[in-house]
Image (cartoon, helix red, strand yellow):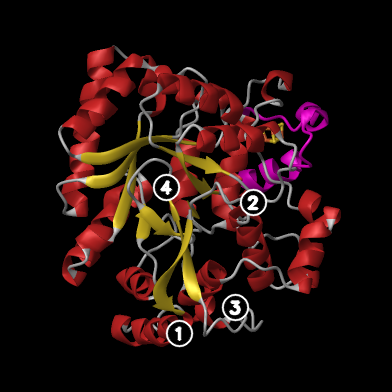
Amino acid sequence: MEKHTDVTRRGFLTTAATGLVTAGLAGLVPGKLLAGDKTKTADTSKKKIITRKLGKTDLTLPIVSMGSINATFPGLIEAAYEAGIRHIDTAAGYQFGRNEQMIGTTIERMKVRDKFTIGTKVYLGGRREAAPEELKSKFRTTFEGSLKRLKTEYVDILYLHDAQSAADPQNPATMEILTEMKKEKKARYIGIATHTQIPEIIENMIKAGIYDVLLVSMNLTMDEDDEWLRQIKNAADAGIGIIAMKTMAGGSRWPNADTRRQYSTATIARASLKWVMRHEHVTTCIPGFATYQEMEEDVSVAYDLDLTDEEKNLLSDNNITYGLGFCKQCRTCLASCPDEVDIPKLMRTHMYAAQYGNLMHARATLDEIPKQNGLDNCLSCDTCQAQCANSVDIDRRIRELKSMYA
Ligand code: SF4
């Protein structure tokens, strides 16, 4: 299942540096580039990138890919390609389509379409209850917009974006349109992307029998005996290719003072990615790096999954794991709120704003919440807190959101 490519660490370091120069951006993002950690990357000069096969597809991918949600300049895509990354994940909704546009233009200019695996997603949001023909038509129109922006006739993986209920994988309209896109050769493979209701969604995905790929939240805050992890393994055993997201429990730039005092962001990033990718049934992960330095930290993991002593310490430190307070989107808290506030979506909004620093995506996520379930409805009664088994400090995050958006 696992292979090593011919992209060497030496080549990566050289080409990543070249990327900085050719992009002409070294001086434009000093905050991000200069404020990073000084922790030395392990010497992997003699090692090769590890690759794994994606389920029953004919794709074999490096174990670290590029999540593009936070990427805002073409040089990063060029440098990622030169570093050995061969799979990029985007979505029709990222940066209101501009993310796909940047990826399409860059890949066309580099003339590497046939070497890059592109995954994109179509989000149907509140339209799930719409009539089947309307749903299919909306999906098709949105996806055709994606193809145009990506400047390609097909994508390698097409996902239903953000499946939210157990019924979503078996929705006849979305199953039909995804299958049609495959038959029309506009998508080589089809899948589901989800952050929530993972065991139920996976169970129905396997039953549906049409899906090739699962893009799913997976990170070190999940215990090994977690039902979510068991179901992800079940999906892999059923031949569905597994791609992991939210691998850093919301980002290595987590503003948890204790964690940050003890470990560098580079160590947090590498330990987090290694934790995920040491599960061999996971093919690849899509960290959303936004700078060359973050990319270098993330790609270094693709050469070597052995843990350093410092990484072992971090991973065995329960205070750190709990301190991350990752919202698993389990929705347990929802029923407890007397004002029907959409707490999980607010927690995601907070993650995008405070951890990703992606205010555009945070705003878009916030705007998806119906007014009657929105931020203004929260009276800070704190009733929900007792329901959360994942140490999410809900009230603090909602107060921070209010200071940003109220
Ligand atoms: S805040 Fe806690 S209970 Fe609510 S969805 Fe997130 S993890 Fe679940």
Q: What's under tag 4, amino acid-wise?
A: Leu
Q: What's under tag 2, amino acid-wise?
A: Ala
Quick check: 44 above or below 359? Answer: below
Please name whichever residue, 241 or 186, is drawn nearer the observer in this view of the structure: 241
Quick check: 14 above or below 359? Answer: below
Provide the residue span drawn in magenta.
377-402
Q: Residues within 10 Å of mark 1 (few under 14, many from 20)?
A: some
Cα distance in 3D space between marks 1 and 4: 27 Å
Circle 4 SS class: loop
Can see residue 102? no
Asked if disc 1 and disc 4 are in contact, CB closer than 8 Å, the reply is no
Instruction: Give the label, 1 or 2, closer to the camera.
Output: 1
N-term mark: 2 or 4: 4
Cα distance in 3D space between marks 1 and 2: 27 Å
Circle 2 SS class: loop
N-term mark: 3 or 4: 3
Q: Residues within 10 Å of mark 3 (few under 14, many from 20)?
A: some
Q: Position of residue 153 (x, y in %)?
A: 14, 47
Image quadrant of residue 80?
A: bottom left
Instruction: Give the label, 3 or 1, closer to the camera.
Output: 1
Cα distance in 3D space between marks 3 and 1: 17 Å
Asked if disc 3 and disc 4 are in contact, CB closer than 8 Å, the reply is no
Cα distance in 3D space between marks 3 and 4: 33 Å
Q: Position of residue 175 (x, y in %)?
A: 32, 22
Asked if disc 2 and disc 4 are in contact, CB closer than 8 Å, the reply is no
Disc marking residue 249: 2
